Amino acid sequence: MKNKRLVSILGGVGLVVIGVVLYLIFHRPDLSESIVLPFIAHQKPAIDPHLPGPTPLSDKLDEVQFDGLFDLSANPSGIVYQDGLGELVGVDQDNVVTVRLKPNKRWSDSYQITVKDDKYTIAKSRDHFFSAVDLQFTIRRIMTLGSLSPDYILLIQAMESPGFEGPDDRGEIRFRFRQNRIWKEADIKESLSFKILPEGSPMNALNYTVGTAAYMPLPPKEGVSNYFRTPDGGAAIPDLILAPFIDNSTYTTELRNGAINVLLESPFGALSPVLTDSRKFFTKSNISTTMFAVLFNTGRLSRDQRTQLRRLLDSRLIADRFFNVGTPQQRHIQDYKGNRDNYADYVNHSVFPTSSYYIEEKIVEPAPARDNAPADLSLLPDTVRIKACTNFGFREEYSELADILNDPAVTRGKVKVTIVGNEEIQRGNYDAVVVAFTGYRSNFLFDLYDIFLRQPDLVTYRINLEVSDDARGAQTVSPGSFRRENNFFGLDAGADSPDKADVNQFLQYVYGFMSTRNIGDKQEYSRRIDQLEHGLSLGAWLFSVPSLAYFSTQFDSTSISLYGVASQLSTIKQWRETPDR
């Protein structure tokens, strides 16, 4: 009797297992000929190739839609620049750079998309070819955006008056580069790698959709477009699909279950314990682009209090706790150089992250020991109230940091971190706030506006830069750029306070760093910013997280190259599926 009962139970278990297997076989989505990327449903990407995007995915999608004269890419050996809408002819002894345009490149609106019953067809429409007037329009737009655009910084550092002569009868144009340096081919191509929009595009739009690159956007659904390869773009894989999810906490599970096949950023920047099967997944590492920081509210904490709070927040200790170093739950990491579990390399001692050009090249040399004096707790409020919002990405990471900072063993019972909605952040109702800065550039174009002039609003991305002309007619930054309510720090250049002179000086340094035409000046500004920010104690810059991407072995790993500052999607048209899969 018992044996019959055991057989019955085992038979039932077997049926369940068979049922699960059959379900996975017949209900697992078919992602063949598709690249499927996740995004957080209430953080829709907005595509503007000349401005930093509100989400990390926004800036990566620029590479999918738009070309520059030259396009940043990567191969197994490092960063490369490929011909986009131009071909470098040469540079003469007077630093006149000659580029041959590619007038046979079509804009994506040369094709008409028809959607019916969730199926679409693409048909030829009126030819719309790239020309020099599109390049003129783009340069004019970038110059109008000014130092809000990283491309503006590139252009004014390359040319006194950004623009070109031509084209001549060979389709060649000429740029007059500055005489103050020897221009190498890679430097020229980097300066001309800004993405080009067609003439007649709006000067300001929420989304730009017409490009010349590998993919074209399909008509949007619920405000978000998927993409299909353009007939002229040369992409190997036809479909690029954006899949919405509530937050990033389920991304690894969705990849394991086959709902997505690419994860551009893993939670905590760490190797995932659920994606260890090398027969199904492989990884690619890139240089870090995300930094976690605690920003201090200067309207609620005095300079002395901010100094003691910075000393209390031990970045190395917090990073070790964040990655569970030395515990069975340790989050293992791997950087793009192949180093593993090198947590100390990600600890920051300055607003310039350790992985940035300014630290790597020792332009800025913050001494790790400068904040090692013990905190004087008697100067701090009874409770330092820190706020964090988990509704706009990094839900798991913010929650983990909240638990760490609330631990008396870390902050000696002086800190209370609360998870709040965006409205609390907008009102500045905090002594300090935890913020993740994403998509920062590791090269000399590090974006300080994103940190110091950004509106304290996690829904709408806005930079509050006001400029005016001085007595000589030169453009300068207005004190109105620092108003208490328009930055995370509560900095106010017009308010009477003991810090007023330093706050105004700091604003001048930030503007000087972002707008200068001279690399040497930029380096000097970076040193001054580091020193004055440390004196003002505006934040604790905690740590960066590795940039680790996971891919399904649906893809041929040899077709995907990530390296250094190259965007994770800059080589997307070369991605291929594994043969015979």
Image (cartoon, helix red, strand yellow):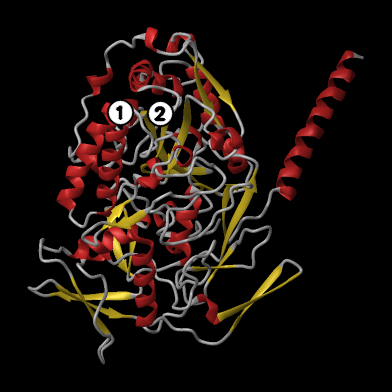
> Circle 1 is placed at which residue position?
536
**Residue at the bottom extreme of this rendering:** 169
Residue 380 lies in quadrant: top left
Please rate how many residues cluster around mark 2, counting C-alpha atoms within 10 Å: few if below 14, some from 14 to 19, many from 20: many
Q: Which mark is residue 298?
A: 2
**Left or right of 114 on screen, residue 98:** left
In the rendered view, tell whether residue 139 sits above or below residue 534: below
**Left or right of 399 on screen, residue 269:** left
Question: Reading the chain from its start, which is encountered first: label 2 or label 1?
Answer: 2
Please rate how many residues cluster around mark 1, counting C-alpha atoms within 10 Å: few if below 14, some from 14 to 19, many from 20: some
Give the camera-side residue of 515 and 95.
Answer: 515
Q: Report the residue at 35% width, 81% height from top.
A: 132
- Identify the element where label 2 is drawn: loop
In the rendered view, tell whether residue 179 sits above or below residue 325: below
Q: Position of residue 278 (x, y in %)?
A: 48, 40
Disc 2, disc 1: CB below 8 Å?
A: yes
Q: Report the residue at 17% width, 55% height from top.
A: 518
Q: Amino acid at mark 1?
A: Leu
**Residue at the left extreme of this rendering:** 93
**Left or right of 522 on screen, residue 333:** right
Q: Amino acid at mark 2?
A: Thr
Q: Position of residue 172 (x, y in %)?
A: 25, 83
Q: Position of residue 144 (x, y in %)?
A: 37, 66
Q: Report the residue at 58% width, 40% height from top.
A: 251
- Identify the element where label 1 is drawn: helix
Query: In which quadrant of the rendered image does the N terminus lie?
Result: top right
Q: Report the residue at 65% width, 41% height from top.
A: 246
